[in-house]
Image: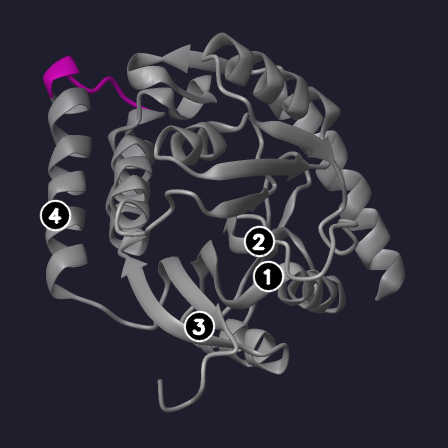
Amino acid sequence: MEMLSKEMLKNAIGYWDNRAQSIIKFKGGEFYTERKASIPYYIYRRNKTLYLMDKLDVKGKNILEIGCGTGYYCRYLKKRGGEVIGVDLSNNMLKLAKKYAKNSSLGILFLKNTAEDMGFKNESFDMILSVTVLQHNENSRLKMIVREMSRILKRGGKAIIFEDIAPKKIEVRMDKKGMIQLFRPVGEYVSIFKRYDMKLTSHVTLSSPFYASAMHPYNYIHNRVHIPPCMELIYPKICVEITKLLDKIWQTEGAGMGYFVFTKGCDEDD
């Protein structure tokens, strides 16, 4: 299991170093890969993430982002008044993060570090943010990361987690470039975080499975026959609007993008 963990870590560093080369800037000051920059669903999901984060009181709080990438959320939280530090494995991502923060005249500290041993003092942070990072780690490393998060998080502090989730059991997936993802059920995260004195205090699921299911036959056809330009514009947008509606009326512990808030030292009765 440890050998797998080391291999996954090595792959992750190479994967994100390569991804950093394809980062582009597009409207709204957001940074993403060229492939996803114009896809309505990813724009919606980013905006939905920010909507959920807007509900957090971050002013004057010491905040750490694990797996900060280009530092988009670090900059966002800094602009809202947080004192922010970002850590990442990828040198290339950190170079971009430092560049973008400097261009925005934002004083953010970015460090290269592994999430399971970050070297900060005990109870250093009021809040820890992690966006689609944990799903790239198998269980033994995930437990080490969560233990480290608990160590450096203040009592009453919050861990804000965004991860792709599965309905009933862990689903292992691998993309074309060999990056492994483990989609876990909500209960799996709840159990692991609880082991390290962090209780789930808020949870929202974004309905990504509908969008993926609706777009799969569309993409299949699109790759084989000509589709009128009007349909290329209209169909994805319709799917996004239905996804938005499902996000409002249908909340489940099934598959989707899970938004979690875990609070350290929160009593069961709180």
Tag 2 residue = 125
Q: Are marks 4 and 3 in contact (CB under 8 Å)?
A: no
Please tell me whether residue 260 is drawn above or below residue 72 in the rendered image. below
Spatial CA distance of label 4 from label 2 is 38 Å
Q: Residue furthest top?
A: 103
What amino acid does circle 2 point to?
Phe
Q: Amino acid at mark 4?
A: Ile
Q: Mark 2 or mark 4, which is nearer the start of the sequence? A: 2
Please state which of the two labelled residues, at mark 4 or mark 1, is closer to the viewer.
1
On screen, residue 187 above or below 164:
below
Residue 242, label in figure? 4
Side of 219 relative to 147 (left or right): left
Depth check, front residue: 83 or 132: 83
Mark number displayed over residue 240: none
Disc 2 or 3, which lies upstream in sequence? Answer: 2
Q: CA distance from mark 4 to mark 1?
A: 38 Å
Disc number at residue 186?
A: 3
Instruction: Say few, some or many: other residues with alpha carbon within 10 Å of mark 4 (under 14 / 14 to 19 / 20 or more).
Output: some
